[in-house]
Image (cartoon, rainbow, N blue to C red):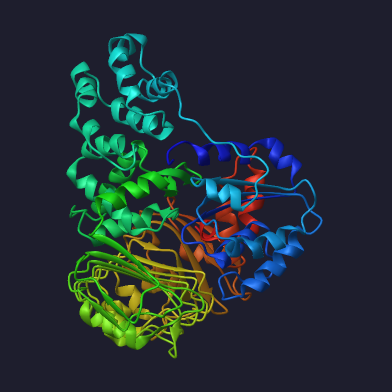
Amino acid sequence: MGGMGKTALSQLIYNDHRIQTHFENKIWVCVSDPFDQRQIAREILGGLNSGSTNLQNPISLESLLNEIREKIEGKKFFFVWDDVWSDRDQDWEPLKAAFQYGMPGSWILVTTRKESVARQMDLSHVFPLKQLPDEMCWSIIAQIAFTGENSDRRGNLEDIGREIAKKCKGLPLAAKTLGDLLRDKQRREEWQNVLSSEIWKSDFAQDIFQPLLLSYYDLPSTIRRCLLYCAIFQKDYRIRKDELIQRWMAQGYLTSADNFGRELEGEGYFKFLAARSFFQDFDNDADGNIRSCKMHDMVHEFVQFLTKYEFVTEKDVHLTLDLSYKKPRHLRLVAGPKGFPMSINSTEKLRSLVVVSLPDNGITNEALQNLFSQSKRLRLLELRLLLQGAEGICCEIGKLIHLRYLCLIDCTDIKYLPEALCELRNLQSLIIRFCPLLKKLPVGIGNLINLRYLSIERCRSVTYYPKGIGKLTSLMRLNRIIVRADRNDAEELSIGDLQHLDLLAGKIYVELEGDAIDGDEAKRAKLHNKIHLKQMYVSISPGIKEDEVVQALNPPSNLSVEIVDNQEDWIFRTIIVPLQSGQLGRLKTVISGSSEETAC
């Protein structure tokens, strides 16, 4: 069952130093459901150092498997397949055939809730995990609840704590959840209330839901809705913390009116949920701040259980889709072999829409047009798709006037964004990632006066940034920018156009164009006013000297300016900075990988 610690135990094995030294390749892949052969193969290659292969572009399963064979041939590998659900032989046969090329002594470790998976895969050893004894559950609860406490408090609460431990039903995740819940409760009456809760008498399909529900109802109401919104993510999704906070902001869950107030409010909510173990598998930056995380499978199933009709996922739908019996507020659509629906009923009240098309199943602009025309209350729109017969998204997107969050990922055939996009005056976040053919941003982008986040990532063809970006005075995060260094250009963005963007924070990569740097134009940028900006990486043309750049920009003491050769150098440096002693194995994985986690 879920919550038994299958993944946690596998992680201990995977990270053991003896595994690191014994096998030439070790790779972790979360399989989950639905089973996607191509995605699994892509993740394997991401861990095998795929060389020149561009894993973001469409590529056939056969090509992926051929490359896997080449990479593992004659080598000893250790693979982990986590959370396997498919027991269909046709799903696994192509992958099994590729693994035969590895050296004898290679191993595959599988975690699953289904015995039929173990039988179908003909595994040589099966280890069914048993429930923990009550004494062990109490040990886990006490270790978490009494961190740093003296023995007097533990002695006063131990008798109740041992009774609470019996409610765990031997599940480690339940013990951990209850330990986090009890940690902030100092009085005996509070522990007694947990033990006597009516929730223990509830009839749930999953035993783990009872302690999770206790912890959920102990949350402030403002934080509960933030947790429930995570139901929109697919299982095992790596959640970027900053983007999660932006999603909460788009839905109106964060209400502070200060410049950075909503971000700080969201940061506080995130830390609260993390402390209660609703998030896990954290990835931290050099300063120890969390960049991304995941949700445990059972926590994810729990939030989906609580939002059964509000958050809906529809997969492999027909040409028409009727949602009238559900009337969802948040919808995730996955286009399968049957195509994308041309008609969808009951989307008038949608607040969030995520559209995904699989590599072989593109979506027409006509279908998107129909969808946009019916979903005019959208606050969040995320598109991961291939367009059929078009190079840009339809202009009807400009009619989504309530939109606050727009994310385009893996839109590999999009070459331009419509000018109608600039009519979205309420837009706060514009995120564009892995769109290799996109060439430029719309000229009228300066009309997006409420834009706080502009993130362009792995879009190598974007070489033109319009001058209107200089009007975005609400902008707080801008990860990459190309500007003229030699003049105040009438159409293109120049370095001096940054003068009014005083809310910029964190890090920024700036590519200076031109054979010289104009001192007056650099001075006009007024970097001394950007007190929240901490790091600027600057790429320069061959005709510009490094010392001239730093002298012209004249950065304040709080802003570190570093000259880099190109954007790849910038990315490499931001990855390598956090490394500490003993993490060289992780460095090898990060540099050779090409997954979204690595990009993060």
Query: Which residue is outermost to the right?
Result: 74
Of the pair 185 and 309, the residue shown nearer to us: 309
- State which quadrant residue 96 falls in: bottom right
The residue at the point 22 percent across, 66 percent down is: 351
Horizontal side of 337 relative to 71 (left or right) equals left
Horizontal side of 527 relative to 100 (left or right) equals left
Q: Is residue 576 visible?
A: no
Q: Quadrant of the N terminus?
A: top left
Instruction: Residue 444: give x, y in percent of width and height.
Output: 31, 83
Relative vertical location of residue 262 with respect to residue 22 in this rendering, above or below: below
Q: Is residue 389 visible?
A: yes
Instruction: Residue 441: give x, y in percent of width and height.
Output: 40, 80
- State which quadrant residue 323 falls in: bottom left
The residue at the point 23 percent across, 26 percent down is: 194
Instruction: Residue 105: give x, y in percent of width and height.
Output: 77, 45
Query: Which residue is outermost to the bottom?
Result: 389
Relative vertical location of residue 373 with respect to residue 239 in this rendering, above or below: below
**Count of numbered marks:** 0
Instruction: Residue 499: give x, y in percent of width and height.
Output: 35, 68
Of the pair 80 and 486, the residue shown nearer to us: 80
Of the pair 532 and 167, the residue shown nearer to us: 167
The residue at the point 32 percent across, 55 percent down is: 231
